[in-house]
């Protein structure tokens, strides 16, 4: 495999963008730690490693491998064995660089191709074994949010921006002001997919460009009107296709700065007349990038035409930098997740008072169990909070089987700040928060995740059970004393005597939890 390994000294533009001064407007950064972000893209796999010191993030290392995952899907959308082999070899190489980075400071994200791949779980299993962390398959809108975070980190103005990131299988369009993204969309067109579909190394390059650009414009057509209303002041492009295009334009015209509409049109016209071989003499563009550049140029031209772009600045930061900023700036990611949960509650008219009651009780039990069950005070607490606040989201569909409706909504909604893995885990909690426990929801989880799942599920089930009557008054203090398989619920005997329905349901819960390996004891204190 060809390798690209770049030290921080070669990325002065990146570091100047990721640095900050006292008037920095970005997230508060965790001090003195090393973070790593892995981007499993449709064309290349990337890894960035950065140090944070106070409010400053410094990129110290980058790795890139042209895995071509997007071109390695068969007709049934399975990753082919040869492509899988390249992907696993790449992860193994990355793992060597991560030996001194704690797993909780590493995040691996999968994008368009892994969203489509039916056997993505095979790479995920290998990632856990090799990297020590799972691959988080993120939605297109979450990908767009992270890209905007990376591109605008350190920005100190409120200018309106249009950010465009061309990947191997999709292109993200983000409109925002300053460091805040407002409109985020992911469109199914990328350099690999366009190259595979439209360009076949024949001499009819002009016709191929015409067809590819027309299809790109058609793909973007639905989102254009909303973005034009944004009235951006500057357009910024990121990722491989756009950086390579800038380098090509500069090799042809050293005075070129960024990408102009005229320069892009002239480049495509020159390729159509002289053929793609004219790019062979441009040493600043790697061979693997040249292999997909025609598709990338067609997508870029479609974006310029659709959004009436005159000039594009080029950013050296993108998705992986956004992931690092999210990792280092815990408060930022937590804020985004809370907003996503609040948005789901509003959209599906959740009874927020009931949700708060349930979480209040679940949190008390969580604090009782945190040491014995080795619960993560940040990750597990956040997951439990989200499940409590969204456990009734399915009531907007129907009361009958509303836990199943909630499961479906949470699996398929776009929730910023959450990966697909996160959403599926929370959806599974909501699916089983009442009635019989469906064990099949944990079949695809790792053993450690299954243990974590059932422990959080116990807390959610007991909390919702205790608030079944939706009584607005406070219930008495509750706590649990857990072991691996025995849970003692400590609650007032007088209160239980006055609430026979709850007492009867607790007796039923003993049998239900017994089916998943827990023995529930109710310790009624007088």
Image: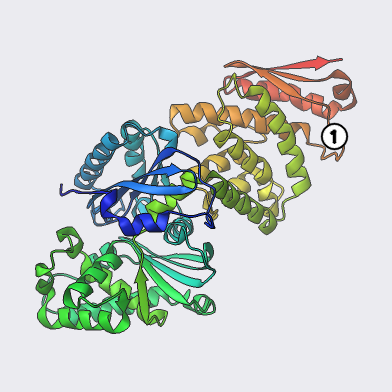
Q: Is residue 11 left or right of residue 454?
A: left
Q: Specify whether residue 47 is in view.
A: yes
Q: Relative to 280, does residue 326 appear above or below in the rendering? A: above
Q: Position of residue 250 (x, y in %)?
A: 21, 73
Q: Relative to 445, does residue 516 appear above or below in the rendering? A: above
Query: Which quadrant of the view contains residue 125?
Result: top left
Using a 10 Å C-alpha cutoff, classify the residue at mark 1 as few (fewer than 14 neighbours), some (14 to 19) or many (20 or more).
Answer: few
**What residue appears at the point 48 percent right and 62 percent down from the top-left corner?**
155
- 260 or 339, which is in the foreground? 260
Q: Specify whether residue 401 is in view.
A: no
Which residue bears the numbered disc 1?
A: 474
The quadrant of the image that shows the C terminus is top right
Query: Which quadrant of the view contains residue 330?
Result: top right
Q: Is residue 494 left or right of residue 155?
A: right
**What residue appears at the point 67 percent right and 21 percent down from the top-left corner?**
511
Q: Relative to 62, does residue 382 appear above or below in the rendering? A: above
Q: Is residue 312 left or right of residue 281?
A: right
Q: Position of residue 257 (x, y in %)?
A: 29, 75
Query: Which quadrant of the view contains residue 200?
Result: bottom left
**What residue appears at the point 20 percent right and 75 percent down from the top-left corner?**
254
Q: Position of residue 473 (x, y in %)?
A: 87, 37
Helix, strand or loop at label 1? It is: loop
- 392 or 131, which is in the foreground? 131
Q: Position of residue 316 (x, y in %)?
A: 34, 60
């Amino acid at each position: 495999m060809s390798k690209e390994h770049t030290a921080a000294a070669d990325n002065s533009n990146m570091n100047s963008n990721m640095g900050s001064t006292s008037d920095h407007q970005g997230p508060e950064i965790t001090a003195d730690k090393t973070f790593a972000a892995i981007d499993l893209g449709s064309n290349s796999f990337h890894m960035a490693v950065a140090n944070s010191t106070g409010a400053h993030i410094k990129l110290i290392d980058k790795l890139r491998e042209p895995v071509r995952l997007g071109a390695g899907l068969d007709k049934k959308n399975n990753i082919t064995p040869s492509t899988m082999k390249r992907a696993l070899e790449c992860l193994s190489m990355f793992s060597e660089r991560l030996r001194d980075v704690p797993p909780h400071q590493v995040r691996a994200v999968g994008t368009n191709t892994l969203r489509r791949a039916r056997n993505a779980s095979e790479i995920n299993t290998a990632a856990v074994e090799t990297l020590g962390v799972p691959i988080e398959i993120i939605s297109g809108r979450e990908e767009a949010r992270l890209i905007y975070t990376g591109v605008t980190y350190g920005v100190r103005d409120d200018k309106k921006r249009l950010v465009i990131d061309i990947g191997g299988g999709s292109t993200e369009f983000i409109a925002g002001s300053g460091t805040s993204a407002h409109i985020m969309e992911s469109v199914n067109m990328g350099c690999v997919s366009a190259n595979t579909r439209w360009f076949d190394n024949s001499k009819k390059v002009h016709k191929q460009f015409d067809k590819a650009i027309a299809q790109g414009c058609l793909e973007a057509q639905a989102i254009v009107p909303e973005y034009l209303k944004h009235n951006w002041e500057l357009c910024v492009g990121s990722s491989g296709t756009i950086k390579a295009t800038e380098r090509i334009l500069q090799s042809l015209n050293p005075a070129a700065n960024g990408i102009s509409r005229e320069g892009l049109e002239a480049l495509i016209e020159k390729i159509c007349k002289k053929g793609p071989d004219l790019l062979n003499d441009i040493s600043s563009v790697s061979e693997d990038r040249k292999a997909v550049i025609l598709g990338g140029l067609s997508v870029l031209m479609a974006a310029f035409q659709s959004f009436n772009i005159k000039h594009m600045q080029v950013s050296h930061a993108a998705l992986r930098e956004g992931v690092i900023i999210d990792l280092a700036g815990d408060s930022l990611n937590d804020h985004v997740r809370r907003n996503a949960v609040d948005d789901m509650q509003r959209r599906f008219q959740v009874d927020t008072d009931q949700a708060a009651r349930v979480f209040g009780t679940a949190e008390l039990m969580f604090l009782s169990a945190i040491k014995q069950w080795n619960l993560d005070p940040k990750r597990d607490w956040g997951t439990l909070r989200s499940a409590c606040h969204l456990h009734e989201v399915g009531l907007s569909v129907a009361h009958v089987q509303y836990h199943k409706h909630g499961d479906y909504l949470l699996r398929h909604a776009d929730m910023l700040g959450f990966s697909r893995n996160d959403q599926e885990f929370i959806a599974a909690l909501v699916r089983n928060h009442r009635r019989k426990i469906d064990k099949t929801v944990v079949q695809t989880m790792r053993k450690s995740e299954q243990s974590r799942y059932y422990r959080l599920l116990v807390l959610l089930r007991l909390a919702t059970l205790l608030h079944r009557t939706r009584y607005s008054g406070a219930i008495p203090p509750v706590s649990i004393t857990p072991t691996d398989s025995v849970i003692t619920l400590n609650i007032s005997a007088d209160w239980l005597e006055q609430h026979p329905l709850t007492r009867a349901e607790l007796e039923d819960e003993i049998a239900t939890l017994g089916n998943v390996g827990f023995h529930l004891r109710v310790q009624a204190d007088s």
